[in-house]
Image (cartoon, helix red, strand yellow):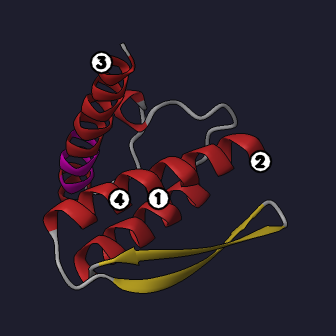
Amino acid sequence: MTQDKFESEVDTLKKFFTKYCEDKHKNQYQHRYLLEYKLNSYKHNIYLCKECHELIRYSFNRLIECPHEIKPRCRKCSDPCYEKKEWKQLAKLMRYSGYKFGLTKIIKLLTLK
């Protein structure tokens, strides 16, 4: 996958995890992540609880290990790399955050009129 696609995927994970964890959990702590991808390093600081920290770390590792040159959406992948337990947790998190971001967008559109 390209560098741009990798960065976009990381940003999406950060955004969705942050929203979910802020809404659902208490006791967030700053976690530092150093991601190495195609000879580039990416540093990220994200406030998450321990449970979300473990899942995003797992997700980052799956993203780095993705064997596809043109990365499909994970839910449409013919050869998924997520374990079933983590997949279910991530799907729940993404569904919740996606819904919240969608509502926020609709509310902003309605308040502009």
Secondary element at image label 4: helix
Of the two numbered discs 1 and 3 on the same chain, state the one appearing first in sequence: 1
- Per the image, the residue denoted by label 3 is 110
- State yes or no: discs 1 and 3 in contact (Cβ < 8 Å): no
Q: Secondary structure at mark 1?
A: helix
Q: Nearer the viewer, mark 2 or mark 3?
A: 3
User: Which residue is tagged 4?
Assistant: 17
In the rendered image, the quadrant that contains the N terminus is top right
The tag on residue 3 is: 2
12 lies left or right of 65 = left
Residue at 80% over, 60% down? 38
Q: Are marks 4 and 1 in contact (CB under 8 Å)?
A: yes
Q: Earlier in the sequence, mark 1 or mark 2?
A: 2
Q: Are marks 2 and 4 in contact (CB under 8 Å)?
A: no
Q: Amino acid at mark 4?
A: Phe
Name which residue type carries label 2. Answer: Gln
Q: Position of residue 9 (x, y in %)?
A: 56, 46
- Residue 63: image location, x then y, percent: 54, 54
Q: Secondary structure at mark 2?
A: helix
The magenta segment is 89-95
Between marks 3 and 4 in the image, the one whose residue lies nearer the viewer: 3
